[in-house]
Image (cartoon, rainbow, N blue to C red):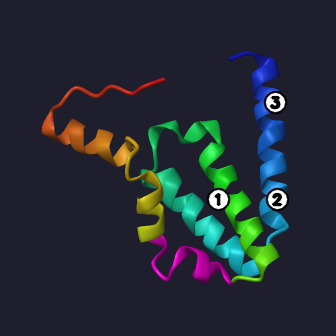
Amino acid sequence: MGIADIIEGKRQWRAHTARVKALPPDYRIVYKEIQRYLFKVGPVDLHDGSLLSGIVDFFEEGVASGSGVLELVGSDVAAFCDGLVKDSRTYADIYQESIRGETCTTEK
């Protein structure tokens, strides 16, 4: 990863956070909880940003349609997050494998 990649990544992250800040307060709160959850136990390939930007897209559509955030994700935000990553390898999986003594491999 070169310096240009780092600069581009920062530019994209700043644009992403600006989109999040433009959401209504209730959407921002739920987004931050989703982000916290995904950063803790989320998919190994979360770094590409497509999942988080997809959530912001989904939320922006919800705002445009006049839906409340809990109408979109349900009352159990953790269950919503689990549904997002159900078919992805997570850091929690890697941790469980390390406890069992299995070989840890990540796809790049």
Q: Position of residue 86 (x, y in %)?
A: 38, 53
Q: Amino acid at mark 3?
A: Glu
Query: In the shown orientation, is residue 83 left or right of residue 11?
Result: left
Locate residue 23: give its quadrant: bottom right
Q: Tell me what residue is drawn at x 82 percent, y 29 percent.
A: 7
Crowding at mark 2 (Cα within 10 Å: few <14, some 14-19, many 20+):
some
Image point 85% across, 67% down: which residue? 22
Label 2: which residue?
Answer: 19
Secondary-structure class at tag 2: helix
Q: Are marks 3 and 1 in contact (CB under 8 Å)?
A: no
Q: Quadrant of residue 97?
A: top left
Q: Is residue 82 above or below residue 47?
A: below
Q: At which x and y percent is residue 68?
A: 68, 84
Q: Nearer the viewer, mark 1 or mark 2?
A: 1
Range drawn in magenta: 68-78
Say above or below: 101 vs 52. above
Please state the horizontal and vertical placement of residue 51, each as a whole percent of the image: 60, 49
Residue at image point 59% right, 59% down: 35
Helix, strand, or loop for circle 1?
helix
Give the SS element for disc 3: helix
How many residues crowd mark 1 within 10 Å: few (<14), some (14–19), many (20+)? some
**Residue 100 image offset from top left, x and y in percent:** 14, 39
> What is the residue that sits farthest to the top in this orientation?
2
Give the left or right position of residue 16, taking residue 40 as reference. right
Q: Quadrant of residue 95?
A: top left
Residue 8 is tagged as 3
Q: Earlier in the sequence, mark 3 or mark 1?
A: 3
Which residue is rendered at x = 33% and y = 25% of the image?
A: 105
For the residue pair 105 and 88, the one nearer the viewer reads as: 88
Whole-angstrom CA distance, mark 1 to mark 2, is 11 Å
Which residue carries the number 1 mark?
55
